[in-house]
Amino acid sequence: MAATPTRTRTTAAPSASARKTGVREQAAQTTRDNILKAATKVFARYGYEGGSVEKISKAAKSYDRMIYYYFGSKEGLFIEVLEEAYRRMNDAESRLDLDTGNPLEALQAVIRFVVGYYRKHPDFVTLLNTENLHKGKHIAKSMRAREYSSPAIEVIRRVLDSGQAQGVFRQDIAARDVYLLIAATGYFYMSNRHTLSAFLGEDLEAPEAMANWELFVIDSVLRTVAPERSPPRRKAN
C-alpha cells in the first residue's frame, strides 16, 4: 500500500513591503514616545515657557520638526504631557484592590495611594504647579482630562456607599468633596515641601515626616466622614 502523503499547512510569509511598514510604524511610535518622555522631564524642570522645543528635541535626540509633526505645536505637546500624567495616575489607581465590604480599610487604602502617588511622582506635582500658574488654560483644551477624574471619584463613591449602608460613614458626605480633601492634603504637602521645610525649620521630605503626614491625613479624612455626633452641651455659667 502506498504511503499517504502528509499534508503540511504553510503560512505565507509577510511581504517585504508589509515588513517595512511595520518597522516604520514601530520607529514612528518610538520617536513619539521618546519626545513625550523628554518633554515631561523638560517641562517639569523648566516650566512651560522655559521648556523650549529645542531643549525637548535635544533631550529626545530628535529634531524640532518631529515635534510639530507628531504634536502640532509646543502647546499641543504640553497638553499631551499633562494628559499622559493624569492617565498614568488613573491607571495606577485602577489597579487598587479594594474591599468595599470593609469601607474603613478601603478608604484608608485610597488615601495612602493618593498621598503616596504625589510623593513618588514629584514631576507630576511640578507639572500641575506649572499648569496652575497658567490658570489651567492648556488642560482646559484637552478632550480627555475629564475621563481621568471620573474613575477616581467613582472609586470613592463606591466606598462611601458601602460605609453609609453599614452606618460607619455619615449620610451627607459627597464623593467629590472627599476626593478634593484627599487630593488637597496630599498635593499641598508635596508642592510646598521645600518652602514649608524652610519656614518650619524641619525636613518635610524626611521619611518620618512623610509617614506622620500620611497618618494625619487618614485620621482627618476618617473624622470627616464619621457619623455626626450630637454637639457637646455648654455648661451653664
Image (cartoon, helix red, strand yellow):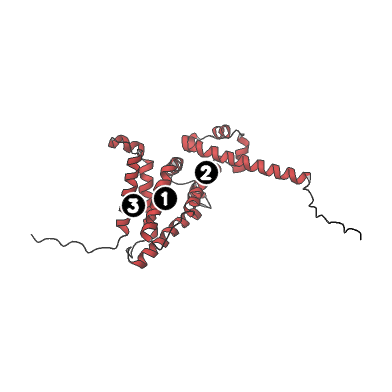
Where is 128 relative to 58, above or below?
below
Residue 38: percent from the left, percent from the top?
54, 37
Towards the viewer: 21 or 208: 208
Snapshot quadrant of residue 129:
top left
Q: Is disc 1 in contact with disc 3, using a CB cutoff of under 8 Å? A: no
In space, the residues marked 1 and 3 are separated at their CA atoms by: 11 Å
Give the secondary structure at mark 3: helix
Give amino acid for label 1.
Answer: Phe
The first of marks 3 and 2 along the sequence is 2
Q: Look at the image and tell me whether residue 47 can be seen.
A: no
Give amino acid for label 3.
Answer: Ile
Q: Residue at x 38, y 61 (%)?
A: 103
Q: Residue at x 39, y 46 (%)?
A: 187
Question: What residue is shown with label 1?
Answer: 113
Q: Nearer the viewer, mark 3 or mark 2?
A: 3
Give the secondary structure at mark 1: helix
Towards the viewer: 203 or 192: 203
Residue 141: percent from the left, percent from the top?
51, 49
Marking on residue 172? none
In space, the residues marked 1 and 2 are separated at their CA atoms by: 22 Å
Marking on residue 81? 2
- Left or right position of 171 against 146: left
The first of marks 1 and 3 along the sequence is 1
Question: What residue is shown with label 3?
Answer: 218
Q: Look at the image and tell me whether residue 85 can be seen.
A: yes
Give amino acid for label 2.
Answer: Val
Q: Residue furthest bottom?
A: 165
